[in-house]
Image (tube, rainbow, N blue to C red):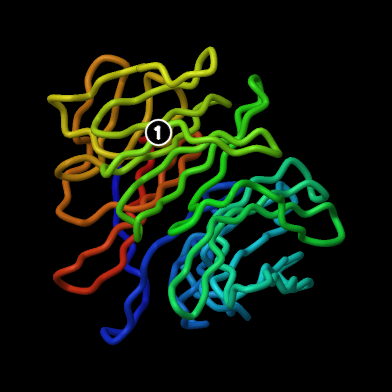
Amino acid sequence: MWEEDTLDLSNLEAMTFRELVGNSPNDIWLGTLDASKDCGLWHYDSIWNRVEFPGYAATALWLFEDNTLWVGSMANQIYKMENNVWTETYYIALENYDRILIFGFYAFSKTDIYAVGWATTEDYQYKGIILHFDGNSWEFIKISDIIDGGFHKIVYQKDINTFFIHGTIDNGNLDVLYKFDGKEISELMSTYYEIGISELNGIIYFNSQKKVYKYINNSLQLWKDFNGTPFRTAFVGRSETDFFNRADGGIGHYNGKDFTVIYKTNLTIYTKIIFEDEIFVAAEDYDNRKHIIIHGKLK
């Protein structure tokens, strides 16, 4: 069963979806790229409500099982919320750069958290950054310079003890996939087409131009080729034979044999989160300036 919830924004407001995290289908957080304190962070507990956020755009989210929420911003700050109260604010600064933008987290524990993003100057010089939190402070990890761009997402695959980072360079035109071992970063793929990163049951998948890869034996190896189907982007799901993503014409679903559009819509599909019996998909109606959460639930 499918339904659509329209977020309560005035016609004068705009919003760019960033990330969905949640511990249950009645406890979900939505972050956006927007600077307005009134629409940068949202929470769902059967209805969607704006949450007062002290920062400038809730661009990165990480939620622990006890509902401790970390939020990265686009203005040098990282915030922590505990029991629905903002309890910590960390100011991040890097010499010779004016702003730090945080776009992704990965946490092993509350005293072992990674963050990725961009360092920028007022004259539009960019650099990719990786930070680590040890329970007391955030520190930069020294890596080879990734200039003219930065990082958007970090994930980790336990069985091979490897991080993967998605970034862009060349003024955002060139998508790049990196491997990171905790100290050194190296490039695995670069393309002027979109790269997507997905996770299913602890395994990381990478897609570009309708092809999906796994990292096996120190190289990217083709897993599935979805050419000839409406498949488009990164996916969420419960297994390799049951996942959802953005497709040409709506929300796509793969059942292990066929990839089909399971929910037809002209809305532009963004971030997604899935639970055992439910899926939430952030979408936008550009023509009517509406921001919508599509909610699918098994009968």
Image quadrant containing the C terminus: top left
Residue 161 pos. (x, y %): 67, 26
Residue at 30% across / 43% down in the picture? 194
Residue at 50% across / 75% down in the picture? 50
User: 293 or 40, which is in the foreground?
Assistant: 40
Residue at 74% across / 73% down in the picture? 89
- Report the residue marked by disc 1: 189
Residue type, label 1: Met
Residue 159 pos. (x, y %): 65, 20
Vertically, is 137 above or below 206?
A: below
Quadrant of res 148: bottom left
Residue 155 pos. (x, y %): 57, 39
Vertically, is 77 above or below 28?
A: below
Residue 128 pos. (x, y %): 54, 55
100 to the left or right of 31: right
SS at mark 1 in the image: strand
Residue at 57% across / 62% down in the picture? 102
165 to the left or right of 252: right
Vertically, is 245 above or below 93?
A: above
Vertically, is 221 above or below 189?
A: above
Image quadrant containing the N terminus: top left
